[in-house]
Image (spheres, helix red, strand yellow):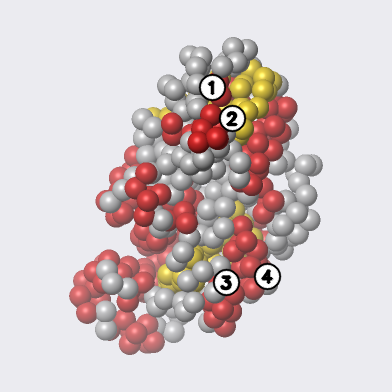
Amino acid sequence: MQARPPLSLQSNRRRWHRTAALTLGAALGLSGLGLQPLLAQTGKPAAKTAAAATTIATDKVALISLDDDPRYGARRLERAYPGHPGGRLLDAVQLGIDDAEVALRGIRHGLALQDARAASLEALPGLLAQLKQERVKFWLLDLPPEGVQLAVKAAGSTALLLNLSAPHDELRGAQCAAQLLHTLPSHAMLQDALVQYLAARSWQNAWVLQGPSADDALLLAAWNRAAKRYGIKTAGIRAFKLSGDPRERDLANTRLLTTDRQHDLVTVLDADGEFARTLPYATQQPRPVVGSNGLMPLAWHPQWERNGGPQVSRRFRKLAGRPMTGQDWSAWIALRAVVATLVEQPQASAVGHARALRGGRIFVDGAKGPRLSFRAWDGQLRQPVFLAHGDGVVGLAPLDGVLHPTEVLDTLGIDQRESACKAAP
C-alpha cells in the first residue's frame, strides 16, 4: 500500500532519467544550453540546480491504481478485448509529460510523476492518506468505481482528481464530486454515439443480447436511454451466459440466441467481452453486430488518420510497444488538461484548477478535431466518439445533422437538464 517513488527511480531508469531531465530542463529553460544530456546521464546535478533556481515551481502528479486490478490480468491482456485496456496507463501519462515540455518551460514549472499502486482495494485508503500527506495536487485515477469514491472522500478539496478508466454514469451523476473530472467517455456518451450512427443508417430494429453481470445491466440502461432518445426500437432482449454447466449450454449458443427475424442488427452488451468476441459472423440471421464487439463506440482508435491522430498513435506505440486504446488516450489527455490549467494559472490551488477546468475557460487538443473542454455540471470532458471496428474508423459522433442549442458535443451523454450532479467547486 506504499506509494512508489518518482518514476525516475523505477526499474526502467533510462526512460525516467530522461523524464527528469525534460521536466527540469523545461522548468529552467536550459535545454538549449547543452545541460539536458548531462542531467540525463547522471541524474545527480538536478537537485542542486533546482535548489539554486528559486523561481521553479514543481507540482506532484500521482497515477493511482491497484496491483490486483482484474482488468490487467495477464489472460485478459493476452486476449485484447476491443474497448478494454491494453496495458497499464503509465506510458500514456509519460507521453503526456513528454508533450508538455515546451509548455512547462514557458511557465518555469515542473511535474513530479509518481506511480502509486495499492495492493488491493482494501489497502487503497492507506495509500490515499499518504498521498494527501505528501501534498500531491493531481490524482490520476485508474480505479474501479469503488476506488474512485474512496479517492474522492480521501482527497477532499486538497487535490484535483481525474477519472481515467471508469465509464460509469453514476460517477458523473448522484456520486459526482466538485473536484472530480472525467476524461473517459461515459456509458451514456458511448451509447448515444452508437445509436446516432444507427439512426443515421436507418437501422431501426435492434435485437439485444445482455450479459448477467451488474455492469451489463448498466450497459442496458444506457442503451435503453439512447435508443429512446433517437428512436431505435428494441425488437427483443435475450440473456446470454457463459457457463461450464451443460444445462446452461444453450445460453451461450449464438445461433439459438439470434433466431428472431424481425431485426436489422444485433446489439451485444457484454462488459466482460468474452461472449461478444464470439458473436460477429456467428448469428443465425445475417445481421451486423454492434455494441461490445463488431461496430463499437470508442474513445480512441489507433487507425484514426486525421487531426494529428497518426502522430499520437505512433509516438505511443514507440513508447509502450502496443497500440493506443481509449483508456490510454484518456490518461494522455488528462495529463494535457493538467498542464493546460497550470499554464493558465500556475499558482492556483486544486479548487482553483477545478473551477477553471469546469468553468469552460480552458481547452485541450485531443487529436480528434474540435478543441475539448469539461462540462460545468458534471466534470465530464466533451469529446467526439469514434464508431469503429478492429481495422478502422467508419464514423465520428456527433454525426452531421445532429443538433444542440449550445454545443453539439453535448448531444453525447447526460445534458445539463438531465444531470443528477449537484456538486460544484
Q: Between disc 1 and disc 3, whose residue precedes? A: 3
Q: Between disc 1 and disc 4, whose residue precedes? A: 4
* Residue hosting label 4: 153
> The disc labelled 4 sits on which kind of residue?
Lys
- Which residue is at a point 43% across and 31% down the rendered structure image? 278
Q: Secondary structure at mark 4?
A: helix
Q: Between disc 3 and disc 2, whose residue precedes? A: 3
Q: Residue 195: tell me if it is visible.
A: no
Q: Secondary structure at mark 1?
A: helix
Residue 189 in the image: above or below residue 113: above
Which image quadrant for residue 131?
Answer: bottom right
* Residue 101 position within the rendered picture, expressed as x and y whole percent measured from the top left: 37, 62
Q: Of residues 126 and 415, which is closer to you in this image?
A: 126
* Residue mark closest to the camera, 2 vs 1: 1
Residue 421 in the image: above or below residue 246: below
Cα distance in 3D space between marks 3 and 2? 34 Å
Q: Give left or right: position of 198 versus 332.
A: right
* Residue mark closest to the camera, 1 vs 3: 1
Cα distance in 3D space between marks 2 and 4? 36 Å
Q: Residue 234: tell me if it is visible.
A: yes
Q: Between disc 2 and disc 1, whose residue precedes? A: 2
* Residue hosting label 1: 256
> The disc labelled 2 sits on which kind of residue?
Leu
